Amino acid sequence: MHTSGMVAPSQPAARCAPHAGAGPALIGLDWGSSSLRAWLLGADGSILARRESAAGVLTIADGRFRQAWEALCADWLDSAPVPPVIACGMIGSREGWREAARLRTPAGLRALAERLTAVDDFAGLPFRIVPGLVARGQVDSPDLMRGGETLVFGALRERDGLFVLPGMHCRWVEVRDRRIVAFRTYMTGELYALLHRHSTLARMCGDPDDTPAHQAEALRAFDEGVDHASGQPASLAHLLFTARTEGLLGGLAAHQLPAYLSGLLIGAEIRDASTWCPHDLTPTLVARSTLAARYARAMHRLGLPGTVAGGDSAADGLHAIARIAGLLEHAGPARQAAAG
């Protein structure tokens, strides 16, 4: 999707290719609700291999987390010594493998590295889970984040920054002096999924095909949704109903409705976030999906300049945390296959 106005992806500091004979030093996992991404990393943080699957935490039955990630990374585990493993995201939630610690903001890399949660299911192989963060929200209710902290520190290039993390739950994260000091979570992605799939809108929504005409019409509908919601964010509940009336009365075609709905939700989020976020920091989008392109388009449309980080920020963050924790110095024997 067109992202005019957003600066091209900011590249991490150049990674040197591992020297001859150097082997893997770390396996990093970004394990969210709906997906699992894995990287095989050298001691210097260079990416030797990457994998991903749809085996998100909420898709795993009967607690078979070990089997899920071993299936994805099988060949990485068959030679000795096996690198240590570090994971972030919902794998450390109550629904995950182990409930990892929650640290209060402000918190920096060292604080995260000092509170890793150990999973002791492996003979001699260190497996650690990064803690999440908790902050006080606008109405003095707690706000929580798991996985986003690792993405932020992987993308951080300066001492201060404002990071936007699109996803099922989008987060806007403020960093000062290399510490996460505040963040706000929006259930934008989850609301979109519920409305698109399970509401009275579900039967009316279609998907655009790949023709330029359909794609352009969907983009126009998205822009219209952004404009409506950003102008009246307090009226979002009413504006969502207009997706139904536009569909019923022929204002929007079926293939435009999902884009219009997305524009309404993202536009309302960005307008609210822009009133909360510090204005001295330029936002950086940390994502690699079509959803990130939508955020970039909406932010540009609303006059919010920004940059886009590279797609492997989680790998960079996991390596940085593991290095501070001394995890790179440990390796285990070749695996013993999980039962079942």
Image (cartoon, rainbow, N blue to C red):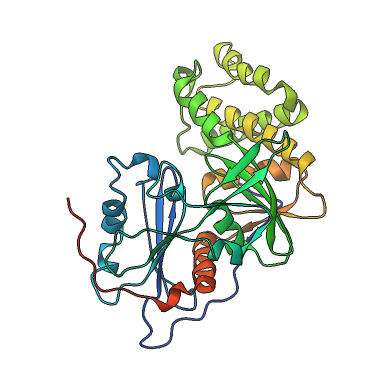
Q: Residue at x 43, y 87 (%)?
A: 19
Looking at the image, can residue 1 be seen?
A: no
- Compared to 294, does 321 lie above or below? below
Residue 326 appears left or right of 271: left
Q: Nearer the viewer, residue 200 or 186?
A: 186
Looking at the image, can residue 238 be seen?
A: yes
- Compared to 212, does 233 lie above or below? above
Occupied quadrant, residue 331: bottom left
Q: Residue at x 23, y 67 (%)?
A: 335
Q: Where is residue 30 drawn, in percent x and y?
A: 45, 55
Occupied quadrant, residue 176: bottom right
Pick out the residue farthest to the right.
280
Q: Where is residue 4 drawn, in percent x and y?
A: 68, 50
- Compared to 279, does 17 lie above or below? below
Pick out the residue farthest to the left.
340
Q: Where is residue 65 drawn, in percent x and y?
A: 31, 50
Quadrant where the N terminus lies?
top right
